[in-house]
Image (tube, rainbow, N blue to C red):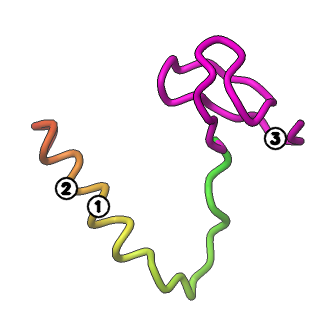
């Protein structure tokens, strides 16, 4: 069991287990990454986020 709250991407339920107790899918952490001014991959994460928003028609 984890110390953090986890999210099941398939059924959007929160749990503290590594697998969802409803659908059995693997869960992911909902805790954001720590901020660092020396973030080497920030540019790429922002680009992916921008592309996702554009694909949804929100930009």
Quarter of the figure that contains the C terminus: top left
User: Relative to 52, does residue 11 appear above or below in the rendering?
Assistant: above
Q: Which mark is residue 51?
A: 2
Q: Which badge, 1 or 3, is on the more N-terminal residue?
A: 3
Kind of element beneath mark 3: loop
Place of residue 3 in the rendered image (x, y in percent of width and height, measured from the top left) = 89, 42
Q: Which badge, 3 or 2, is on the more N-terminal residue?
A: 3
Residue occupied by mark 3: 4
Kind of element beneath mark 1: helix
In the displayed structure, does residue 33 sit left or right of residue 54? right
C-alpha gap between disc 1 and disc 3: 25 Å
User: Relative to 33, does residue 44 appear above or below in the rendering?
Assistant: below
C-alpha gap between disc 2 and disc 1: 5 Å
Quarter of the figure that contains the N terminus: top right
Magenta span has 15? yes
Which image quadrant for residue 49? bottom left
Magenta span has 54? no
In the displayed structure, does residue 28 sit left or right of residue 53? right
Per the picture, the main secondary structure of the magenta-coloured stretch is loop
Which image quadrant for residue 27? top right
Residue occupied by mark 1: 48
C-alpha gap between disc 3 and disc 2: 29 Å
User: Relative to 47, does residue 17 appear above or below in the rendering?
Assistant: above
Which image quadrant for residue 29? top right
Q: Which residues are magenta?
A: 1-29
Place of residue 44 in the rendered image (x, y in percent of width and height, measured from the top left) = 34, 73
Q: Report the front residue among 4 and 57.
A: 4
């Amino acid at each position: 069991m984890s110390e953090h709250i986890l999210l099941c991407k398939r059924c959007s339920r929160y749990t503290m287990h590594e697998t969802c107790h409803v659908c059995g899918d693997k869960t992911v952490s909902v805790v954001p990454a720590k901020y660092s001014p020396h973030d080497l991959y920030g540019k790429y994460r922002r680009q992916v986020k921008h592309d996702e928003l554009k694909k949804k028609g929100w930009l």
